[in-house]
Image (cartoon, helix red, strand yellow):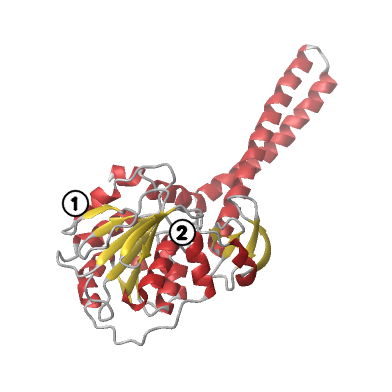
Amino acid sequence: MSRPGTFRDLVVIGASAGGVEALRSLVSRLPGDLAAGVLVVLHLPAGSTSALAAILDSAGPLPAEPAKHGAPIEYGHLYVAPPDHHLLVEGDCTALAAGPTENGHRPAINALFRSAALSRGPQVAGIVLSGVLDDGTAGLVAIKSRGGLAIVQDPDDAAYQGMPENALANVKADEVLPAAEIGEQLARILNTPLGLPRPGGPGAMMRYEQALARDVPAGELLGKVGQAAGLVCPDCGAPLSALGSDREGFRCQIGHAWSADALLSTADHRMQAALWTALRSLDEKTALARQMAAAARQRGNLELARRYAGSVDETGAAARLLRARLTASDHGASPGVRREVDSDGSRQPAAD
């Protein structure tokens, strides 16, 4: 990478639900002589396999490959985060790390963006594509704080608008374009000389979170950069500390990171799971009461049969009400969650 200090020559891209198609569109329009290295994170579940590198390799002129630890970042190459590893930037090389999950994800978009901002400052362009919730927003904040560029997919062009909309609500974007136009315009954007003063050094918060992503013990710093939030981590049950503003989110002592939106969404999912468990209990109680009522009638004990029949009516009505509420919820927020899982995992790349 031979243009330090003059041009932007590192591109970091984050995508989640609907991201495979957005990445394809973007990559298909990139020039073959792009004077920058491109690093990509798509949310993937642990233990999965990913065909994303092969998909992007065939989608456009730039070669794409799974990122490797300690490999030099070369111009005109795409590097894709493998499952269950954060993809980070260390100087002019890629790094893979097994640090704590962020918003339940490893690889995490924010971890990549933050490390690029720390290592390369103004030479970074960060791109947020399709996805739900607010992944990538905190990372774009870090990139902008170090003098880098923020590029966001036009929400109207995204299959899932949550990530682009959250980024635009919290970061002054330098470019807002459909995914294909980002690919067309990226060379022009990168070839604009920096013309910016060098930013100051990174703050304690950014260094702390970078250390955690690299799986370097940093728990002793948590008390200095955060304060008890009165909440527990959905991943491990440890107490959470609030890290400044809601955009900086929360961390537990182990290091799991959560934005406010992701934490709320996770709480909703846990509550819904508890309600489904309650519904199953009501169904079981209704079935048992119906059996007991039938047995009492066979024995001629009509009073006992009436009592059991009343229990059938009561628990059945409660089950119907709860089922209707849960079914309505499934037709609202839940499908988006289920589709994100499908899009995040190896299943979508394999299907595409």
Q: Is residue 179 above or below residue 82?
A: below
- Looking at the image, residue 95 sits to the left or right of residue 24; the answer is right
Give the CA distance from mark 2 to mark 1: 31 Å
From the image, tell me which residue sits under label 2.
214
Question: Residue 58, labelled with which disc?
Answer: 1
Determine the residue positioned at 29% across, 87% down.
195
Q: Is residue 230 above or below residue 176?
A: above
Q: Are marks 2 and 1 in contact (CB under 8 Å)?
A: no
Does the image show residue 157? no
Determine the residue positioned at 67% across, 39% down.
278
- Looking at the image, residue 161 sits to the left or right of residue 30; the answer is right
- Looking at the image, residue 240 sits to the left or right of residue 177; the answer is right
Q: Could you say which is closer to the camera, residue 311 or residue 210?
A: 210
Question: Residue 257, labelled with which disc?
Answer: none
Q: Residues within 10 Å of mark 2 (few under 14, many from 20)?
A: many
Splitting the image into 4 quarters, where does residue 115 fall?
A: bottom left
Give, as a three-letter code, the residue at label 1.
Answer: Ser
Does the image show residue 59? yes
User: Residue 217: percent from the left, percent from the top?
Assistant: 55, 59
Q: Could you say which is closer to the camera, residue 127 or residue 348?
A: 127
Splitting the image into 4 quarters, where does residue 192 fall?
A: bottom left
Q: Secondary structure at mark 2?
A: loop
Determine the residue positioned at 39% across, 61% down.
88
